[in-house]
Amino acid sequence: MDKCDGGQPNSLRADPLGLTLTCLGELVAWHETYHAEFLDEWAELYRLGDRLGNPVWQISVLGQVSRGKSALLNALYGEPVFPVGPLHGVTQWPRTVRWQVRIGEQHYPVDLTDTPGLDEVAGNQQAEMAWATTEAADLILFVTAGPLGDRELEALGQLQGQNLPLFLVANKQDLYPDWTAEKLTQQMTTAGLASILQYQLPIFLTTQKTNPPHPGLESLNCAIATWVQQDAPHRRARHILERAIALEKKLGSALGEAKTPVLHQRLVPLLGFQVGLVMICPWNGLDILWGLLGYLLLIRRLCQGYAIPLPLHQAKTLMSTMFFALSLLYLVGWGEHFFSLPGETQGFWSASFLQAGIVAWGHVQLRRRLESYLRQGYLWGRQGPEKLLSLMEPEIRP
């Protein structure tokens, strides 16, 4: 690895792993206090925090049988630590070996995980074990040989959906000398895998020969060293934040199913009281006051019911809805005051019922808008996963 210059680490404005750990700590502390009865929905946050603190980077190899996955890892490691043989499917279960990536005087521990083929004769059990390694992987080496088969294209499509860092290794180039990176790119584009390619998916052409080392193998070594030094922290943080967002949405959905019916029943008296005050109040300015206080109380009760803070990034939308409803309320009251005849009650009651309808409409609109955000879970705190992910995206290299 001495021949590889990993370059200088990315200069994110703050440590991505540290910020992500702070975010997870805030989420866990909040849910332990307010959502302990929904532990099943957010308990995985504990495991994600443990993974953040793991100083070892995880590289998992995937591919079909007889693509040379184990031989490739042996070449990277420098010793035959993974069993290989002339028969198909020598690797029957995942196996991990600790590797030290050395750049100058620095050493970076990496776990290399070999996996069974995705098309093992034994059936789905081996494939499931192989896919299970991707859950904790920081980088995937997808090994192929020759033209991509249907199973390989399907697997790449699944990896595309998981948004994991991916290197594509076209192995056994001594057997497929005419199969180039350009042809691989064209085949993947035709198969609808353009979103992987748009991030400039690294493609390495290698052979089984290790003496002398194939240039493609040396390029792969250097790419892994650069990735470990520069990109690994950001990639791991991003993957964990994405997983935390998914967990929060799962929790928010569960909260919606459990809390919404009860909350709606409790909000009926509030709406009735607010409508009654607006209808019977003869002074237009107080109509606006009662409407505003009722809407603010609605927002407070919904946030308390879900036990999730008000999503401040959406406060502008909520304020716009309130302002529109209150403006309509004022215009109706103003029109009734200036256009009704003295002693006439029909206009007064018509305006009152119209104002009641406006108040009810505003109540429903605010409730729907706020609940749509509360049902996404606790994403919008000071160190919320959505906010951190948006800050981190520009720092993640393709």
Image (tube, grey):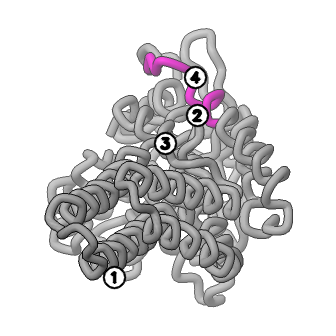
Amino acid carrying mark 3 in the image: Leu
Magenta-span inclusion, residue 74:
no
Q: What residue would you read off at disc 2?
A: 382
Of tags 1 and 3, the one toward the viewer is 3
Q: CA distance from mark 1 to mark 3?
A: 47 Å
Instruction: Give the numbered dot on residue 150.
Output: 1
Verify CB contact (< 8 Å) between mark 2 and mark 1.
no
| Nearer mark to the viewer, of 1 and 4 | 4
Q: Earlier in the sequence, mark 2 or mark 4?
A: 4
> Which residue lies at the image location 74% right of the left edge and 43% below the top edge?
49
Residues at circles 2 and 4 in contact by the CB criterion of under 8 Å = no
| Figure quadrant of residue 358 | bottom left
C-alpha span from label 4 to label 3 = 25 Å
Distance between mark 3 and mark 2 Cα atoms: 10 Å
Q: Residue at x 56, y 11 (%)?
A: 104
Q: Is residue 88 left or right of residue 63?
A: right
Q: Residue furthest top?
A: 105
Residue shown at 58% from the left, 34% from the top: 382
> What is the secondary structure assignment of the residue under circle 2?
loop
| Residue bearing the label numbered 4 | 15
Mark 3 neighbour class, 10 Å CA radius: few under 14, some 14 to 19, many 20 or more: few
The residue indicated by pointer 3 is 312
Q: Quadrant of residue 146?
A: bottom left
**Mark in front: 4 vs 3:** 3
Distance between the alpha carbons at the discs numbered 2 and 4: 16 Å
Which region of the structure is painted magenta? Answer: 10-20
- Amino acid of disc 1: Asp
The numbered mark, 1 or 4, whose residue comes first in the sequence reads 4
Q: Earlier in the sequence, mark 1 or mark 3?
A: 1
- Whether residue 265 sits left or right of residue 12 in the image: it is right
SS label for mark 3: helix
